[in-house]
Each structure stands twice: as C-alpha cells, then as structure tokens.
Amino acid sequence: MSNIFRVILRGIVKGAIYVYCKIVHRAKIYGKENIPKEGPIIICANHRTFLDPPLIEVTCGRYTRFLAKEELTKSKFLAFLGWVFEAILVKRDSKEVKALKESLQTLKNGDCLALFPEGTRNGLEKGEKVKDGAAFFALRTGAKVIPCGIKGGEKGNRKVTITYGKPLDFSEYKGNKDKEILDKVTNEIMENILKLAM
C-alpha cells in the first residue's frame, strides 16, 4: 500500500514541479528524443542549484533514481522529495556498499540512474575533482550515458534550459577495471556535459 501511495504521490509532485519550472523558470527542454524509452541508462549533468535534480526528474520522461548525498535529509522538504523519488543516499567520500548495490540493481532492472559527476553544486568552480561514479557504473553494466547540460535557474537568471545529448556508448570497455580507461570515460562524459551547458 505504501508503494502505491508513493507512486500516486510521485505523479502529483512531478506535475507540480513541472508546472513550477515552466511558469517560474520558463523552462525549455531540448534533446528529449535522445533518451531511450527503455533499457538501463545513466543521466549525468552539471550541477548548479537545488533545482537540478527535480528538473531532470520531471523532464527526462523515465522513472529515475538519483544518487544524493545523505546530508540532504537534514532538510525536511528535501528528505520528502528523496523519499518520493526513491533517491539512493550515499555518504560523502564513502564507497558505501548499500548505495553501490542499489545503484547497480536499478540499472539491472532496466531503469534510469542519475548523478552529478561534479559531486556537489558548482564542483568544478570549487576545484573539486570530477567523480568517476558514472564511468564505474557504465563500465560495470554496459548502460549508456546520457550527458545533460543545464543553464540558468540561478539568482538573476531565472530562466532555465535543459539539454539532453546523444547517448554515449562505452560498452566496448564493459568489465574493464583499468584506472586509465575509467579516467578516459569520466573525462569524455564531463566534456560532453560541459558542451551542452555552454
């Protein structure tokens, strides 16, 4: 019963967020046709504001689970959104096995996993090293990566644009655990994201 309630609530919340993004942020969506309608995919985007995760949730057209830092649950509203959208909570700077297993299972189920390689908002501007989680999941499962660029939404620039790029296929490296390949894939993913966010 709880799961049915969550599905119904998710639909209502998604509708409300979509209307909010369209009216308040005059959201424009491009490249949605690049997102496969079925099969495991990993959506990777740049991260600027708290609007980014819900924006992806309501525009990608797929059941999507986000990897989110555990600290977000300190906010009751964000904790509520995390519950509604079944976010996978992960401890910062931790290779938590539970989150890892949930993420892999999500892809194994043929669903969509979403994450921000920057690791935190404006991670590149803060000098953070790009995280290799997306590359790890892509190489482990063979899932295609959908790069996503988000512009606007900040103070002084309320209008937001979200662009989904063509799928990146790294299946030739499936199962490869070489650090050089992991870094190569990570860099390629981030380069595509930045191009879309320009």
Image: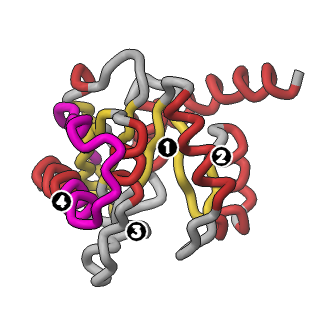
Q: Are marks 4 and 1 in contact (CB under 8 Å)?
A: no
Label 4 vs 1, first from the N-terminus: 1
Residue 36 on the magenta span: no
The local secondary structure at tag 2 comes to helix
Q: Are marks 2 and 4 in contact (CB under 8 Å)?
A: no
The local secondary structure at tag 3 comes to loop
Q: Which mark is residue 121?
A: 3
Label 2 vs 1, first from the N-terminus: 1
Indicate the amino acid at tag 2.
Answer: Leu
Q: Which residue position holds label 4?
A: 184
Q: Which mark is residue 81?
A: 2
Front residue of 62/174: it is 174
Q: Which residues are magenta?
A: 160-187
Q: Nearer the viewer, mark 4 or mark 1?
A: 4
Residue 154 visible in the displayed image: yes
Label 2 vs 3, first from the N-terminus: 2
Q: Are marks 2 and 1 in contact (CB under 8 Å)?
A: yes
Residue 187 lies left or right of residue 140; in this view the side is: left
Q: Which residue position holds label 1?
A: 54
Indicate the amino acid at tag 4.
Answer: Lys
